[in-house]
Amino acid sequence: MANAEHRGRPEEAFGATAVGGTRTRLHTVRLGLWLLAAVLAVRQVAAVLTTPRGERLTDLETWFGHDGVLQVSGSLYDSTRFTGTPFSGLVLKPLSRSAAQALGWGWTFGTLLLVVALGLVAARALPQPVGRRTALLAAPVAISLLVLSLPVRNTLWLGQTSIIPVLLVLLGCFVARGQRAGGVLIGVAAALQPTLLLFAPLLWFTGRRRAAAASGVAFAAGTALAWAAMPQDSYTYWVHHMAGVGLGGRADDLANQSLHGALLRLGLEGPVEIGLFLLLGAAVVTLGLRRAVRYAHDGQLLLAVAITGCTAITVSPTAWRHQLLWVLLALVGTVGRRASDRLLWPVAVVLVMTLPAQMILPNVAALHTVRDNAVLLAALAAATVIPFLSRTSPYFQSPVPTQYAPPVPTRFRHVPLLPFLRRVLSRPNLLLELLLIRVTYAAYSRVRLAATGGRERAEEHAHQILDLERALHLDIEHAVNHAVVKIDWLRHFFDFYYTSFHFLVPLTVLGLLYWRRPVDYRWARASLGFATLLALIGFWLYPLAPPRLMPNLGIIDTVHGVQDFSKPDYGTLTALTNQYAAMPSLHFGWSLWCGAVIAIIAPKLWMKALGLLHPLFTVAAIVATGNHWVLDAAGGALVVAAGFGLTHLFQGPRARTAVTAATGTEGAAAVPQQAVHPERSAGTERAAKPDQDVRAERAERGESPEPAEKERA
């Protein structure tokens, strides 16, 4: 429907029923998104207001003073600020406490209202043309992302005012009537955050010179008024600290995401650091403002505002976490000529602005510099290097389309999500996949670590498993473990296999599929994800002590060494991983997934056999080293089978199988152009070329079966 609106096609071309159904779905989705935004807002407010008084709104507490009356628990006169009578203290102290509590509630809800206003203004300011779907969903999505973002969460927690300057700038650019009114709002924002004066040249070079002049006058008037009222404080800020440099926390703190903070963290200091900061800052300002002016002339004023804001926080001496909302606004920029690449920039920005950097990048020493400056790098990239598309680009509204397999008649269409899940034939964006894998694994690790269940419960479940194995005559763990321990080379082999191949083989399989079989990559990745999710549920519901952690069982821990059973956490290993996450065994489950994928996809019989050896070696390793029960492996096999089943349920058969069933030919090459690219008309459909084998091989690699035709198109 959005495509039809962009291309100017009448709604009647789709039929009244189709249009009505689309409208109903859009309104339903919109209602759901508004409910989600409300739930997120309530959750954030509740998290703040239910926190003990001394741990929330800490910046707001400075208005009361560290030694104010409300912080005194003994005599009223322990406070250096109280000079009233004891009677006045007796009467006014409870009222003062109520007033302080009310101020906390009012400040928190007031901040939330500012966030809602910011989201509404940003949604209204999206570059035109905006389709019906975007117009309906933009506001709740924007508010939800703002509430989830780290700057807003910090602002709510600390009681900061950093949302106000951003809102004032957006109101001045998109809501205020008349240039002078808009300029005054931006000038007031600059008086609160001086680097926002960069918006004055943006206004000037985009033809809004009255607004630029008004912003400068408003900034000067506000600063002069503060100087007249508080001359000593103004001297301290503007002269002694050179526009606030050095105030607040340490400038080299990780929370300071500016060029100045990054240079200090790199070990530079003194005149060298100051000179380099000024040089780099001048280059960033020049390049950032030029890009912002260009996109403003292109009709993307919100993107221009976001680029200018990113430039401002980059060159600011201090840009604390609660001041970094400008990076989130850069989501409105369109990046990528291919439809499959369009999600990379917004996903990266959302992850950087909502998750700790430790979840985005692994804990590798070589990546610490990038991880410590993730938000700064995102702001710097938005200001200087990200190739946002111009509205005049032919790819702005019509990116290179994604190739899809034809719909499969046997899919379960009574499941609501299925009509939207089509099988993609082209290779996915590599950076997006790496981000997805990293964030998913980080979330998996946190959930797994949290699902401990307690030692007593885990050992009770272990006795249940052991009793069941004895009933089934499967209790071979002790015999296998002691047999392997007696043979040194075999023990070392299984120890190495257990510790080395758990991650290496699945990542290698995913990498080879991405490189050689992108059609199968998505299918395999989805089945692995479903299996892992089901395993997490198992860890949470059924914590299980492995054989090596069962007292009096006599199992020798060949990998981790002798355990001290007198300590409930078994040493430092518990802090790294949940040792009771044994049922189901993902060591065996992931290895079985590898073997099944290789057996299904590999073209040679010896490759299939080699792939199936991996789960066999793994199940021997997990039992021999004392890390799993035999039934843990059965649980791993069960979740892997369920993962493949859910993938088939939600996505239909494997893409190559689906293409073969739909066309009666082998491979994706015989798919008509109309099926692969549904947006093309029937008149452009061409007959398949006789060289089917070559085209099938190209399709499996994610390449177009007819590259010449694609280039001409």
Image (spheres, rainbow, N blue to C red):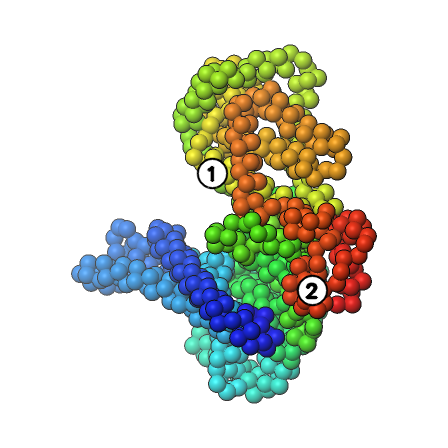
Side of 107 where 141 appears, left or right: right
Q: Is mark 2 on a helix, strand or loop?
A: loop
Q: Camera-side residue: 105 or 538?
A: 538
Q: Residue 537, labelled with which disc?
A: 1
Residue placed at 59% from the left, 86% from the top?
Answer: 209
| Residue 154 visible in the shown view | no
Residue 168 vertical position relative to residue 483 in the rendered view, above or below: below
Residue 488 vertical position relative to residue 173 in the rendered view, above or below: above
Side of 690 where 527 appears, left or right: left
Quarter of image, res 573 = top right
The residue pinned by badge 2 equals 400
Badge 1: few (under 14), some or many (20 or more) residues near its Cα, within 10 Å?
some
Q: Camera-side residue: 583 or 258?
A: 583
Side of 239 where 509 appears, left or right: right
Residue 346 in the image, given as x and y percentages of width and height? 59, 61
Residue placed at 75% from the left, 63% from the top?
Answer: 686
Q: Are marks 2 and 1 in contact (CB under 8 Å)?
A: no
Badge 2: few (under 14), some or many (20 or more) residues near its Cα, within 10 Å?
some
Residue 319 vertical position relative to residue 192 in the rendered view, above or below: above
Looking at the rendered structure, the kind of residue marked 1 is: Ile
Quadrant in which the C terminus appears: bottom right
Residue 475 in the image, given as x and y percentages of width and height? 51, 16
Q: Is mark 1 on a helix, strand or loop?
A: helix
Residue 332 in the image, given as x and y percentages of width and height? 58, 68
Residue 212 in the image, given as x and y percentages of width and height? 57, 83
